[in-house]
């Protein structure tokens, strides 16, 4: 899962990036240049992995990972356009973390979080509109040449164009935004978004807005403060978190928010002495979940042996859960649930 951090200049994107990676970030900046995005991978700690490791005693325990991407410049600004459109660096991301300044800027300039949000939001919409219009023009040209477009593509693009021309992001129409036929376009405004309000150290409140965007979660992060806390030892960090009434780190809050925005869940496998967490979209069938683990499991899928984490926790061991009839055999259409422990039976 990859999250792109965007925001206008002076919004504190780099500070938020540092707060979200801190000591838990595995930097991937080898050979980094100014034209490259900054990337860091963080571990998604999960108490359920710890519990499973105590029971199964594997040689290896593997948590899920999240990758954060910070574009080399601010997409949508004149400087970024001269570099060939750095929105392209964000297109590969699954979710957008839109950082908005809510603190006094250079020269004492007051924050305008609502105005700043809509400025970058409108640029994403305009960018998608241009992509849509170019593709519609290409389809029209192909049609004149006697080439038929992919079934349904024309009507889908026209629906996108109609929504974007009204100034609305594609995420406002979840069914349209998630249509598999549009996946290759990597529309920016179709991506789930989490808005990070970057406040001063002492400010815990969300600012009031006249016009809030639809279906987007807002989260306050005191960027400079939480960047410093992220670099501290656990004992030092605990003191500051308590002093500033921060119940969870910015990283853990953003992880929860991004999982919610993407409608993601975790299931677990115990294979070859390794307990491992896998992140998938909620409602995904067992066959697709098997393919997430290994293509051979999907190809030769027979059954999924399923035990819920809560049932294992209640019974204490896999054997006791099996005696209680809580271990089930499910087919390829079974919808995987959060916390399922799955052993895929397959034959290739």
Image (cartoon, rainbow, N blue to C red):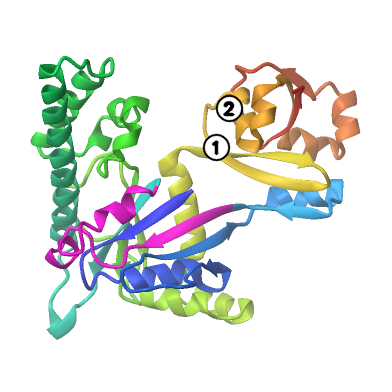
Residue 174: percent from left, percent from top: 31, 30
Q: Nearer the viewer, residue 53 or 332?
A: 332
229 versus 185 height, above or below? below
Q: Is residue 284 magenta?
A: no
Q: In this view, does 348 lie to the left or right of 141?
A: right
Residue 273: percent from left, percent from top: 83, 47
Kindly indicate whether the residue at mark 2 contacts the one at mark 1 (C-beta within 8 angstroms).
Answer: yes
Which residue shows up at 61% across the image and 28% down it? Answer: 336
Which residue shows up at 25% across the image and 21% down it? Answer: 153
Residue 47 makes an appearance in the image = yes
- Residue carrying label 1: 280
Which quadrant holds residue 279? top right
Crowd class of label 2 (few under 14; some 14 to 19; many from 20; radius 10 Å): some
| Magenta region | 65-93
Crowd class of label 1 (few under 14; some 14 to 19; many from 20; radius 10 Å): many
Residue extending furthest bottom?
Answer: 107
Q: In this view, does 52 lie to the left or right of 62?
A: right
Which residue shows up at 44% across the image and 71% down it? Answer: 19
6 versus 175 height, above or below? below
Mark 2 secondary-structure assignment:
helix
Q: Is residue 1 left or right of residue 289?
A: left
Q: Is residue 221 left or right of residue 153?
A: right
- Residue carrying label 2: 288
Q: Nearer the viewer, residue 345 or 254?
A: 345
Which quadrant holds residue 159? top left
Please tell me whether mark 1 or mark 2 is closer to you in this view.
2
Mark 1 secondary-structure assignment:
strand
Residue 33: percent from left, percent from top: 37, 73
Which quadrant holds residue 99? bottom left
Q: Does the magenta stretch include residue 91?
A: yes
Sequence-first disc among 1 and 2: 1
Residue 343: percent from left, percent from top: 76, 31
């Amino acid at each position: 899962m990859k999250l792109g951090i965007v925001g206008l200049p002076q919004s504190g994107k780099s500070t938020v990036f540092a707060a979200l990676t801190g000591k838990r970030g595995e930097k991937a900046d080898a050979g980094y240049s100014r034209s490259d995005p900054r990337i860091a991978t963080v571990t998604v700690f999960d108490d359920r992995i710890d519990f499973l490791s105590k029971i199964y005693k594997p040689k290896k325990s593997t948590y899920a990972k999240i990758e954060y991407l910070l574009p080399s410049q601010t997409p949508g600004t004149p400087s970024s356009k001269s570099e060939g459109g750095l929105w392209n660096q964000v297109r590969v991301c699954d979710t957008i973390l839109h950082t908005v300044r809510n603190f006094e800027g250079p020269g004492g300039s007051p924050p305008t979080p609502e105005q700043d949000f809509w400025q970058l939001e409108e640029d994403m919409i305009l960018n998608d509109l241009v992509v849509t219009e170019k593709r519609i023009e290409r389809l029209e040209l192909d049609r004149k040449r006697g080439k038929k477009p992919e079934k349904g593509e024309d009507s889908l693009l026209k629906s996108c164009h109609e929504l974007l021309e009204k100034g609305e992001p594609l995420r406002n129409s979840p069914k349209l935004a998630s249509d598999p036929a549009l996946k290759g376009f990597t529309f920016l405004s179709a991506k789930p978004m989490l808005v990070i309000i970057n406040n001063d150290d002492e400010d815990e409140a969300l600012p009031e807005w006249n016009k809030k965007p639809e279906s987007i979660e807002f989260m306050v992060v005191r960027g400079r403060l939480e960047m410093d806390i992220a670099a501290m030892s656990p004992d030092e960090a605990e003191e500051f978190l308590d002093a500033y009434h921060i119940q969870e780190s910015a990283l853990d809050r953003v992880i929860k928010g991004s999982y919610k925005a993407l409608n993601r869940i975790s299931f677990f496998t115990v294979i070859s002495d390794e307990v491992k967490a896998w992140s998938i979209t909620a409602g995904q069938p067992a066959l697709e979940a098997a393919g997430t683990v290994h293509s051979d499991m999907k190809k030769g899928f027979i059954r999924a042996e399923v035990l819920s984490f809560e049932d294992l926790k209640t019974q204490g061991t896999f054997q006791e859960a099996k005696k209680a009839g809580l271990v089930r055999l499910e087919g390829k259409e079974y919808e995987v649930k959060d916390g399922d422990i799955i052993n895929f039976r397959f034959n290739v």
